Amino acid sequence: MPPTRGRPIALKLLILLLVPLLSLVGLWVFAAALTGGVGLRLLAINDLANNLATPSGVVTTELQYERLASVEYLVSGQGADKLSRQRDETDRAVATFRRLAGSQRNLSPAMTEQLATVNHRIDQLVEVRRAVDGLTVPPLDVIDSYSQVVDASFRMYDAMVLVPDLALYQQARAVTTLGEAMDMLSRERAMIAVVLARGRVESRERETFTSMVATRRLLYSQAVSHLDEGLRGPWDRLTESPVYREFLKAEDAIRGQAATNGLPAAAATWPVDGQNLWTAVEREQARSTENIVRRVTPAAAGLLIKIGVAGGLGLIAVVASIMLSLRFRKRLVRELAALRDAATELAEVRLAGLVSRLRMNVHPPTAAETAPVRVEARTSEVQDIVRAFNDVQSTAIEAAVGQARLRHGVSQVFVNLARRNQSLLHRQLLQLDSMERATEEPGILADLFKLDHLTTRMRRHAESLIILSDQVPGRSWRNPVPILDVMRAAVAEVEEYERVEVLQPPPVALVGVAVTDVAHLLAELVENATLFSPPQTRVDLRSSTTPHGLMVEIEDRGLGLPRQELDALNDRLSQTPEFDLAQSDQLGLFVVSRLAARHGIKVTLAASPYGGLTAMVALPQSLLADQPALSGR
C-alpha cells in the first residue's frame, strides 16, 4: 500500500544518497579547479616575471645607482654629468616597466594595490631630483626618499610571490629577501660616500649606518638559511670570500668610529670594498632569480599532469559511486516497501481481525491468524526487522488472547454477581411489596417506600453490570408500555426523584422489548442531572414527537461543561467504546452508550439555556407502538 502521509522512503533514500554524492562531486570539482588553478597560476608566473618582476628589478637597480650618484653629487658638488646620465637610464627603465605592467591582465587586488603604490612612489622622484639639484636636502633624506621607492617595489614582490608549491615558494621568498639585503648594501654604499666626504662619522650617520648593517646581515643570514643546496652554494662561497670579509671590516670600522674622531687610513678603500661586494652580490642575485624562474614551468607541468591523472581517477570513482549507490537504493527501497506492506497487513488486517474476533469468541487463534510475516530480503537489517515483527506478532497475539480471556472472565464474574444480586433484589422487592400492602401505619409505610426505592436503585446498578458484560437483564415486557410509565419508572430508580418533574408526554407507547433498557437509560441520565446540579434546583423530563420518532429531553440547571469536554462525552456516547475499568467514575455513560447502540437510540448532550446540560434521547420510530397500551409484565 502507498504511504498515507510524508515523503516516501525512496525519495528520502535518494536525498540521503544525493547529499554525499553531490558533496563528493563538489569536492572533486573543487579539488580539480583548485589544483588546476594552482598549475595555471604557476604558468602565469612567467608572465608576471616578464611584465612586472624583471622590469621592476631593472628599475630598482637603476634607482640604487641613482641614489649613490645623487648622494655623491650632494656631498662633493661634482658628478653632475654622471648623475644626469643615470637619471636617463632610470627614466628608460621606468618607462619600460610601466609599459609592460600596463599590458598585464588579471592581477589580484593585492597586486593592483601594490603596483599603484610603486607608481605613486616613482612619481615622487621629480620632487627628490629637484631638491638634489638645488643642493637643499640632507644626504640622509635623499637616501630615505629613494629607499621608499625601492621598498614599495619589494612589497610588490611580496604580493607577486604567491607560488602554490610550498618548497618553491620558500625559495622564491628567500631570493626576494636577498634582494632586500642587496638594497641595504646599496644604502650602506651611499652612507660611506657621505662619511668619506665629511671625513668623520657623525652621531646620526653612525646610528643610521648601524641600523642598515644590522638589517642587511639579518636579512642575508635568514635568506641563505632557507635556500636549498642548489641555490645556497654560491652564497656560502661569497660569504667566505675575501671580498665579503673586507666589507665586513669596513662596516665594523664605521660602526665603531667615534663621532669626533677622524677616519682611519683604511677608509680610502671602503668605496672599492663596497663596489667589489656589490658586483658579486648583483651577479649572484641575477643567477638566483633566473634559477627560480626556470623551476616554475616544470613544476607547473608536473602538477598539471598529476591533476589530470588524479582528476580522471576521481571522476571514475565518482561515477562508480553513483551507480552503486543507485543500485543499492533500488534494492533497499524494494525490500522496505515489501516490509511496509507486510507490516501494514499485519497491523490493519490480521491483528485487527483477530482482536475483533476475540471480543466475541475466545477460542485459540487458528494457524492462518498466527502465520508469520514473510518478506524476501537479502539485507540483514531488514531480515532482523522481519524476525522482530514476527516476535511482536507472537507477543501481541498472546497478549490479545490473554486480555480477551481476562475480559471474558471479568464479564462472567460481573454477570454472575449481578444476576445473584438481581434475583435477591427481585425477591426483596416482592417482600417489600407484600409488607407495604399489609401495613397501614404511615411511618412504617414511608420507611418501606424508602427501602423499596433503595432496592430499585440497587437492582438498576446490578443490571448495569449485566449490560456492561454485553448481556441482557432478565426483566422484560410483553406488551407496549405508555411512555409516561416508562419515564416514571426511570425517575423511581433515582435517589433524588422528588426534584424531577415529568411533563406530560405525547400519547405514545414503547414496545415491550425496549421498555427495561430505555427506562434504565433514562434513569442513568436523570441521575447524572440530579448529581451535577444544585440540590435546590429541579430537573425537567419532557418529550415530544418528531418525524423520526420521539425526542426525550432531560434538562438540569447545573454549572454545565466546557465545550471540549462536552464534545468528548458526545463522542463516547456515539462510538460505543469498550468499557475501561480505569474510568469507573463514568460508569453511567458506558451503560447509556451500550443501551443506545443496542436499540439504535441517539443520545446527545448539549448546553442548557438555564446554564446546565440538556440530554436529548432520540427514540427511533421502530421502538414506538402505534397506539398507547397498558403496561403489563
Image (spheres, rainbow, N blue to C red):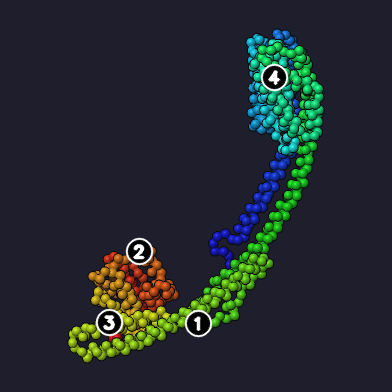
Q: Quadrant of residue 94?
A: top right
Q: Which mark is residue 453?
A: 3
| Marks 4 and 1, the one that precedes in the sequence | 4
Given contact means CB atoms under 8 Å apart, are the residues at marks 3 and 1 in contact? no
Circles 3, 4 touching at the beta carbon (< 8 Å): no
> Looking at the image, is 25 positioned above or below residue 188?
below
Tags 4 and 1 touching, CB below 8 Å = no
Q: Which residue in the protein does label 4 denote?
A: 255
How dense is the environment of label 2, judged by Cα within 10 Å: few (below 14), some, or many (20 and up)? few
The answer to whether 396 appears left or right of 476 in the picture is right
Q: How much space separates mark 3 and mark 1, taking CA atoms?
A: 38 Å
- Which residue is the site of mark 1? 361
Note whether residue 64 is visible.
no
Q: Looking at numbered disc 1 in the image, what kind of residue is underneath it?
A: Asn
Measured along the vertical axis of the image, is residue 299 above or below residue 144? below
Residue 160: x and y, percent?
70, 31
Q: Earlier in the sequence, mark 2 or mark 1?
A: 1
In the rendered image, which quarter is residue 78 located in?
top right
Residue at coordinates 60% horizontally, 73% vertically from top-left? 390
Amino acid type shown at disc 4 = Arg
Query: Quick one: SS at disc 3?
Result: helix
Give the amino acid type for the residue marked by disc 3 in the picture: His
* Residue at 72% across, 26% down: 217
> CA–CA distance between discs 4 and 2?
102 Å
Callout 2–callout 1 Cβ contact below 8 Å = no
Q: Position of residue 110 (x, y in %)?
A: 65, 31
| Res. 562 mark | 2
Viewer-side label of 3, 1: 3
Image check: 10 left or right of 62? left
